[in-house]
């Protein structure tokens, strides 16, 4: 069934369950059968950098949405196409920020499992959620979105 332009781009449960479920699952497996990325405390400290960048990127994306008075969450219809701020170099700065924070968790917990699950989560989002949001953008914003899509990469 085709989506209508007034409908939202995605579902809350999908986004929340994939990110939090994957992280929780990886953490549980790591707790039961640890598989470190690299032994030593420095790996945990290295996890602070992607966390800081991820939080900063999420705040920057949120500020861009607020400036344009449109919804940040994919389960709410978009009022306007946001192409400035972090959206000028990635079409998915919110998901990119989640990716960075997820990477931070894998480093902080020194867990190869969380890192592997991160790859699975990325593939799921790249193949399912993001294409759904791109179809919504094309239906709602037409040529303006297609031009934006041609100009700015999906990730970085």
Image (cartoon, grey):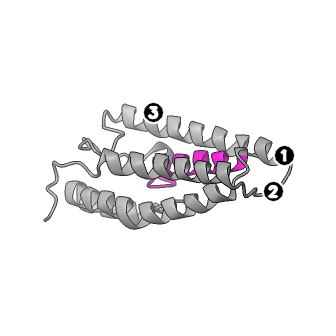
Lateral position of residue 129 relative to residue 94, left or right: left
Q: Is residue 131 above or below residue 82?
A: below
Q: Is residue 84 magenta?
A: no
**Whole-number angstrom distance, CA of label 2 to CA of label 3:** 36 Å
Residue pointed to by mark 3: 63
Q: Which segment is the magenta one?
A: 87-107
| Residue at image point 14% right, 64% down | 2
Q: Are marks 1 and 2 in contact (CB under 8 Å)?
A: yes
- Residue 55 coordinates in the image, percent (x, y): 58, 37
Residue pointed to by mark 2: 38
Badge 3 element: helix
**Whole-number angstrom distance, CA of label 1 to CA of label 2:** 9 Å
- Residue 113 circle label: none
- Residue 42 circle label: 1
| Residue at image point 63% right, 51% down | 103
Lateral position of residue 8 relative to residue 13, left or right: left
Mark 2: give few (<14), some (14-19) or many (20+) Cα within 10 Å: few
Snapshot quadrant of residue 118? bottom right
Lateral position of residue 131 relative to residue 138, left or right: right
Badge 2 element: loop
């Amino acid at each position: 069934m085709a989506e209508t332009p007034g409908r939202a781009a995605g579902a809350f449960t999908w986004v929340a369950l994939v990110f939090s479920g994957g992280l929780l699952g990886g953490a549980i497996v790591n707790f039961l059968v640890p598989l470190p990325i690299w032994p030593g405390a420095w790996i945990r400290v290295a996890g602070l950098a992607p966390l800081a960048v991820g939080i900063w990127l999420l705040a920057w994306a949120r500020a861009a949405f607020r400036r344009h008075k449109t919804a940040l969450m994919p389960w709410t219809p978009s009022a306007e196409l946001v192409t400035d701020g972090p959206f000028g170099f990635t079409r998915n700065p919110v998901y990119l920020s989640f990716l960075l924070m997820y990477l931070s968790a894998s480093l902080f917990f020194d867990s190869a499992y969380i890192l592997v699950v991160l790859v699975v989560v990325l593939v799921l989002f790249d193949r399912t959620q993001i294409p759904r949001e791109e179809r919504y953008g094309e239906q709602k914003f037409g040529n303006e979105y297609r031009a934006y899509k041609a100009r700015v990469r999906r990730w970085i």
